[in-house]
Amino acid sequence: MLPALSIFGVFHVEVIQGSITGAIFEEFTAKVVQLMNPYPGRNSVLVMDNAAIHRNQIIEDLATERCVLDVLRPLEN
């Protein structure tokens, strides 16, 4: 299962059989950002951790054209 959550609950979910590939995640992200609003509106900030699947230019471009992208990065000492 691949959900998109907000403080108001789940606003998009897809059930995927098998592993989530980069291409599947790109398609999912494209659908999610269409449901989002420009900042500072409701559902306008996209937060992802630093998983490899989240870190590519296509995902970043999809997110930043419609909403604010905040990729959590490891803290540097």
Image (cartoon, grey):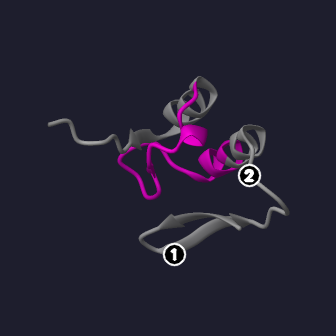
Residue furthest to the right:
17
Asked whether residue 46 is drawn in magenta, I would say yes
Residue furthest to the left:
77
Mark 2 Cα-neighbour bin, 10 Å: few <14, some 14–19, many ≥20? few
Give residue 55's position: percent from left, percent from top: 53, 33
Q: Which mark is residue 32?
A: none
Instruction: Count how many numbered circles sit on residues in the image.
Output: 2
The residue that appears at 62% across and 53% down in the rendered structure is: 35
In the figure, 65 relative to 22: above or below?
above
Is 35 positioned to the left or the right of 24 in the image?
Answer: left
- Label 1 to label 2: alpha-carbon separation: 22 Å
* Element on which disc 2 rests: loop
The residue that appears at 83% across and 59% down in the rendered structure is: 18
For disc 2, the marked residue is 20
Q: Nearer the viewer, residue 44 or 52?
A: 52
Is 5 positioned to the left or the right of 20 in the image?
Answer: left
Give residue 30's position: percent from left, percent from top: 69, 42
For disc 1, the marked residue is 9
- The magenta stretch is 29-56
Give residue 1's position: percent from left, percent from top: 71, 68
Give residue 49's position: percent from left, percent from top: 44, 49
Q: Quadrant of the C terminus?
A: top left
In the figure, 26 relative to 43: above or below?
above
Which image quarter: residue 12?
Answer: bottom right
Is 2 positioned to the left or the right of 47 in the image?
Answer: right
The residue that appears at 20% across and 36% down in the rendered structure is: 76
The residue that appears at 60% across and 34% down in the rendered structure is: 59
Mark 1 Cα-neighbour bin, 10 Å: few <14, some 14–19, many ≥20? few
Q: Nearer the viewer, residue 9 or 59?
A: 59
Which image quarter: residue 23?
Answer: top right
Q: Amino acid at mark 2?
A: Ile
Q: Amino acid at mark 1?
A: Gly
